Amino acid sequence: MSENPLVSVILTTKNESKNIKRFLKSIALQTYGHMELIVVDNNSSDKTKEIAWKFTKNVYNYGPERSAQRNFGAKKAGGRYLIFLDADMELSPRVVEDCVKLALKSRLNILTIPETTVGAGFVPRVRKFEREMYIDEPDYEVPRFFDRNIFFEYGGYDENLTGPEDYDLPYRMRLKNKIGRVTEYIYHHEEGLSLAGLLRKKYYYAKRGAFYALKHPRLVKIQGTILFRRVYVKHWRKFVSNPFIGAAFLIVRFLETVWAVAGFVSSVGITGFLKTFMYLFKK
């Protein structure tokens, strides 16, 4: 490779001692060698920081939420490229190399890395079924690799958002920029994730997602209706080929919808929820 730009890998954590070592090992095994690792922890009470220090000296404490942590990490980064990751992820060995090659060859400033769920158990199987439908769907896949200049040009992640910030920043960017896509994978380790844990997460993100709905009402029609999405119809063959997991997926989506509505109502009230719901019927 004629160029060898520095890539800053930015990891945000909070009580991730069970996951972080696997993530850090996958970074150490990357075929691309010119990287720096920045860990931004949010007041962990376990051994997350102690484990991180074994892999990098760039360990910081910052909060209160993931968006702020990511922006803080970006400001500390020295790389030409920034990649934002979570501790429950594991990268295939050529992810970073694949990103840099495509960015340099195609002069793209924003890249999506495909993601899949791994792990035994009912909920991970349902999550894997869901993620497979989002592959190469720009409204659902999340770009994580950015040229630092474009990242700061768009102000980084919106710190008023927690959860939807992953979609907000790329949406703002793709209105005027092309987003590329590599072929190497990120693996989400969701073993041990229970249905109760999944629903608690959905409630929490929905409670904090009211501002996102106001900011991007167009996306409410696409992403907000988690029980009925056009992408499910597009991939109807998946439901036919695996009817058991397909039915289980729809049941889980129904429960997630109930918890999401409860979280949203707790934030904006029933009137605010009804106003948002009515937007679904506008042309």
Image: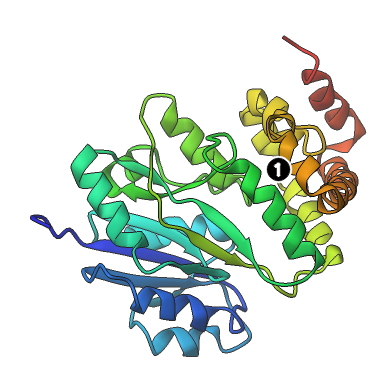
Quarter of the image with the C terminus is: top right
Q: Is residue 184 left or right of residue 67?
A: left
* 190 vs 161, nearest the viewer: 190
Label 1, residues with CA under 10 Å away: few <14, some 14-19, many ≥20:
many
Give the colouring mode of the picture: rainbow
Against 217, is 134 above or below? below
* 113 vs 278, nearest the viewer: 113
Residue 30: percent from left, percent from top: 32, 71
* 147 vs 97, nearest the viewer: 97
Quarter of the image with the N terminus is: bottom left
Q: Is residue 76 visible?
A: no
Q: Is residue 128 left or right of residue 169?
A: right
Q: Tell me the amino acid under the disc marked 1.
A: Gly
Against 135, is 33 above or below? below
Name the residue rendered at 70%, 73% in the picture: 191
Name the residue rendered at 90%, 48% in the picture: 251
Name the residue rendered at 48%, 90% in the picture: 50
Q: Secondary structure at mark 1?
A: loop
Against 119, is 150 above or below? above
Instruction: Tell me where residue 272 sits by quadrant.
Output: top right
Q: Is residue 159 left or right of residue 100?
A: right
Residue 207: percent from left, percent from top: 78, 48
Name the residue rendered at 44%, 83% in the picture: 52
Q: Is residue 98 visible?
A: yes
Residue at label 1? Answer: 209
